[in-house]
Amino acid sequence: SITQTQTSPVSLILNECFCFLPGLGVREHSQIVAQHNRLRSRVQPMAANMQKMEWNEKLALLANERAASCHTDVPPQHSSSFSHIGWNTHLSADGITSFSDIIDSWFEEGKDFLYLSGQCRENVTCQHYTQLVWATSSHVGCASRLCLRDRDHWEFFVCAYFPGGNWEVKGQLVIPYKTGLYCSLCTSSMSGCFRLWDHVGGLCEIPRNPCRMSCGHHGHLNSSSCKCMCDPGFTGRLCQVRCSVQCVHGRFKEEECSCLCDVGYSGAECAEKVQFPFRSCDVMIDGDCFMVSSQADTYYGAKSHCQKRGGILAHIHNQKVQDILAFYLSQLETSNEVTNTDFETRNFWIGLTYKPLKDSFRWDTGEIPRFSSFAFGQPDNQGFGNCVEMQALSAFNWNDQRCKTQNRYICLHGKAPSG
């Protein structure tokens, strides 16, 4: 059988409850949560899966309900969205103690908890401690009330925890946390690691910044792409580079003050409008102009050539574009053969590269591909072949290749202007 142990220090039913005490304020909430987290980060032996505690107002209301009843023995019956609540309670004469002292006293019980056996020392209680440091209890709400018993005022302190702890299996307490280097056993949903400035260990938390990065004072983070969007005049992965030039119709290249122009513009500051199309399109698909180069170059050389002509290396966002381009390339006769000594392959660069820091392929705009057409068994060279080509031997499906390879390439010149 599985049961939950009770944590009340006394079994009393007091005659009346007088609500003399005002409810806890935001400051008290913060102090209670901070104290819980500070103590939870200091358990010995160190915890590997201890979760960060947060305040929960619904739990506080339930704690207030129990405190108002002055029943220290049995929690009140209620309908709640919480499936399992843990309780810590304390009763003392009015005015002699505080919540901070009570929480410290609960933690002091840890001296009587034997971690290896998961048991308290004989004839002592330590189940306030085990609930306080129950690793998967991540929310707390507390309240206190004055109660009258035999004409004496008593203060009743209550904390409710969710999910509750102090489970027993066949009479043996489940060990409240797992040992190991702090944050080493956090779950995927709580993969962040919260560390106090005076911490001994760390606490698992839901990462507020899953990208684990900050864009400083001159940019803001796009958390979906984990990419910094820089203020005008700044570039760099973290927007740390200040530039003296401007990109009128474009943006700075990453880590350097040179411009990557929008489709249809060229020049050092992307201020010169390029006549559309630069020459007749080889293939027009849904208004987009695709031009196949007659010369070969490295990936970054090809990227630069496309930009100078007011375009970008081709992006392929759906199966229709892939099928049409693959068909067109397969129909090329002599122009698809290795007729120039600079050509190393019969393949064509497109604007997709592998980003090791992101551990993913990205289009040159930073966009994550929503469509891909890698050949069977590809990609297989991440870290060595970081640039993507349409491969002739694989029916012009995609292959990751060394970026310094000399390939022909496909430029995209965007939609033709209306009128």
Image (tube, rainbow, N blue to C red):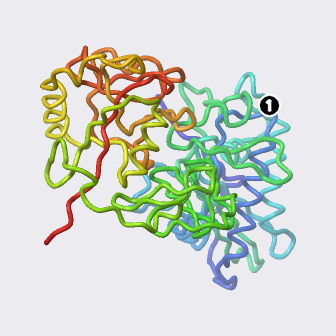
> Observer-nearest residue: 304 or 10?
304
What residue lies at 60% left-to-right and 64% top-to-bottom?
A: 219
What residue lies at 43% left-to-right and 22% top-to-bottom?
A: 401
| Amino acid of disc 1 | Pro
Q: Quadrant of the C terminus?
A: bottom left
- Please indicate whether residue 134 sits to the left or right of residue 383 in the image: right
What residue lies at 36% left-to-right and 31% top-to-bottom?
A: 295
Q: Which residue is mark 1?
A: 45
- Please indicate whether residue 349 sits to the left or right of residue 208 in the image: left
Residue 109 x/y as whole percent: 81, 44
What residue lies at 75% left-to-right and 80% top-to-bottom?
A: 151
Residue 13 x/y as whole percent: 62, 64
How many numbered marks does the figure carry?
A: 1
Residue 110 x/y as whole percent: 80, 40
Helix, strand, or loop for circle 1? loop
Q: Quadrant of residue 23?
A: bottom right
> Observer-nearest residue: 140 or 7?
140
